[in-house]
Amino acid sequence: MSQAPFELGPIRPVAEARSLLIRTTRGCPWNRCDFCVNYQDMSFSIRRVEEIKLDVERAAAYYADHPFTSCFLQDGDSFLMKTRDLLEVLQCIRQHFPHLERITSYGRAATMIHRSPEEMKELAQAGLNRLYCGMESGCDTVLERIHKGTTAADIIRAGHLAKDAGMEISEFLIMGLGGQEFSQRHARDTAQALNQIDPDYIRVRTIGVKVGSRLEATMRQGEYQLQSEEALIAEQRLLLDGLEGITSYYSNDHAVNLLMEVEGRLMTDKPHLLAMLDRYLELPDEERALFDLGRRLNCFRSLDDLQNPGRRSAAQSRRQEVDEHYPGQGDEICHYLREQVV
């Protein structure tokens, strides 16, 4: 397909891979989170309503009545638009794409808490019915250290506003964001915040410190220490164990995660999810090291692949090559490979 004749932003959630993309803002209004480089060289701006509506019309002509069921509003903060402007855009999108079942957007807590409950309900009724919220952590110490620009209390409040309005919410969190020093607090406090929100989806990510990020500079100064793959899974187990009384769907739906198979409905599947994490943590050291590298090099897709002769042989060969060229640097190699897919 030829290049789209309308404006597109740089990213969208994994779950929106098949969605119509309509850009309402450019960049991120905060753009100071230490781990993020997505909008590093981009000034934030809100696009004019007429400009967005023209893009919707162009998209409708370009896709020639393709029956999209989902639309994602790019970039970082559609909620900074005036409510009446966002409602006008939502109406235009639904008019030109009548098969849509949902319209989705990133939802930044620091912005959402300035919306009234009535405004949130009006937006939900107009079709904006799912939000992707980057909580990253429920630990105020970690949030402050990474310059998130919000607090756990605001994250919880924003989640309640969205849910009370009838919107689905997905909360993103990042394993390893607190480093070695704050690992346990990060896991426990994040679990407590999630318990108060009860989001529809909990989407786990694993830290991969991007080259050029402020977190990389902090790491080079020795003020942030990476964890091993084993320690990251132990942190995730602590988080998961602390999730109580909520109905969320728990997902490791990104290739940056070591154990993508750990997903399910918390109300029914939590014991099974914990058992999968324990299965990894109980592997002998050599077997776990083989899996870590094999998974990061795509020799393995899941723990079950350790029993697949072909995949195991491929992983052993790659492990031997790495050990010859980078002896004793398994954790560093795994982190480098994570950073490539964030």
Image: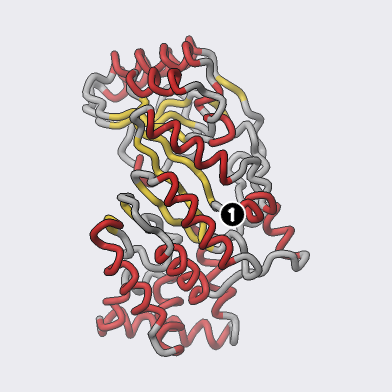
Q: Nearer the viewer, residue 213 or 5?
A: 213
Q: Does residue 250 sit above or below 121 in this rendering?
A: below
Amino acid on which the number 1 mark rests in the picture: Cys
- Compared across the picture, whether 69 is left or right of 29 comes to left
Asked which quadrant contains residue 221, the reply is bottom right
x and y percentages locating residue 258 in the rendered image? 42, 68
Which residue does the image show at 54% across and 19% down from the upper left? 47
Which residue does the image show at 40% across and 56% down from the upper left? 254
Which residue does the image show at 55% across and 88% down from the upper left? 324
x and y percentages locating residue 91 in the rendered image? 35, 14
Residue on which disc 1 sits: 139
Q: Does residue 294 sit above or below 267 in this rendering?
A: below
Q: Nearer the viewer, residue 337 or 46?
A: 46
The N terminus lies in which quarter of the figure?
Answer: top left
x and y percentages locating residue 248 in the rendered image? 33, 50
For label 1, the crowd category at 10 Å Cα-Cα, with few meaning under 14, some 14 to 19 and many 20 or more, is: many
Kind of element beneath mark 1: loop
